[in-house]
Amino acid sequence: MSEPFYADARTYDRLFPGGERAVELYRAEADRHGGSVLELGSGTGRTLIPIAADGHPSVGLELSPDMLAEAQRKAAERGVDVDWVQGDMRDFDLGRRFDLVIIAANSLLHLHDADDLVSCFRSVSRHLAAGARLVFDVFNPSVHVLAGADGVRRTREELAFKDPGRGNVSVDVAETYDAAAQVTRGTWSFSAESQPDYLVVPLELRSVFPQELPLLLSLGGLRLVERFGDWSRGPLTAESAIQLCVCESA
Ligand SMILES: C[S@@+](CC[C@H](N)C(=O)[O-])C[C@H]1O[C@@H](n2cnc3c(N)ncnc32)[C@H](O)[C@@H]1O
């Protein structure tokens, strides 16, 4: 249940600025594979708009109407042509194939059930052209971090941002980890000086552990070709923050 988290797309962009290294990597992947690109969970277009601006025919599939509207606004402002589609990555049929499918910035972790992940991978495999790749990034789960999710509300200084209407905004997060479901359940509270807790929203993200990932992919008709642990394509280790995965049709 994370839809309310994405109901204010401009707050999302202020909360998570940056991501340049990720965007550069996905742009390089689009150039390497050439041709058309589909992004699932395309959000406000942070990754897909630069790819489309590089000349790749691009489609963004996104569940949240608010994120989609903000992506549309940003693309129009920059004069970039992207086909934005409202849809659910768990099961979709766009009636065409792509040279590259991407799922950036943990969007995949919004699918909590193994069945949903497999169904998403099956949908992806129906949309891959010959020789095409699926590239995505998800957290590499840390048992230390998961064990520290004690439900206590804490201020996350690094997430503070400035809102043009409200001024300085501080962000508190309280998280618990449901080990049976492999889901971290968070409550994110946003406060301005004159408006404490003006926005309180849930964010729930699954952990996909390194050894289950190839199995889920193979059930969805995909094969893991390469997996990296950072944006420089270094190897995946126990300390890696991310799993950056490159897959092909099985
Ligand atoms: C962490 S954001 C990442 C957005 C974007 N990829 C980026 O790099 O900034 C996750 C996005 O996935 C979308 N999302 C979540 N569940 C989805 C689903 N089942 N189908 C399509 N999009 C979904 C959310 O609405 C949100 O925009």
Image (cartoon, grey):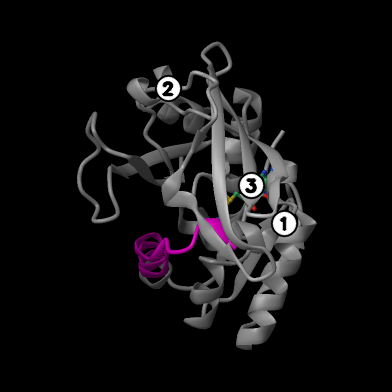
Q: CA distance from mark 2 to mark 3?
A: 23 Å
Q: Horizontally, is 159 left or right of 21 in the view?
A: right
Q: Establish if 126 lies above or below 110.
A: below
Residue visible at 67% across and 69% down in the picture: 71
Measuring from the top left, give residue 243's x and y in whole percent.
Answer: 36, 40
Q: Establish if 204 lies above or below 130.
A: above
Measuring from the top left, give residue 170's x and y in whole percent.
Answer: 55, 50
Q: In which image quadrant can residue 115 be found?
A: top right
At label 2, which amino acid type do we have? Answer: Leu
Q: Which residue is mark 1?
A: 8
Q: Horizontally, is 80 left or right of 53 in the view?
A: right
Task: Please state the extent of the stretch shown in magenta in the rendering.
Answer: 13-29
Q: In which image quadrant can residue 247 be found?
A: top left
Where is the N terminus found, in terms of image quarters?
top right
At label 1, which amino acid type do we have? Answer: Asp
Measuring from the top left, give residue 241's x and y in whole percent.
Answer: 32, 39
Q: Which residue is mark 2?
A: 146
Q: Which mark is residue 21?
A: none
Q: In the structure shown, which secondary structural element does the residue marked by tag 1 occupy?
A: loop
Q: CA distance from mark 3 to mark 1?
A: 12 Å
Q: Which residue is mark 3?
A: 190
Q: Looking at the image, is mark 3 or mark 1 nearer the viewer?
A: 3
Callout 1 crowding tier (Cα within 10 Å): few <14, some 14–19, many ≥20:
some
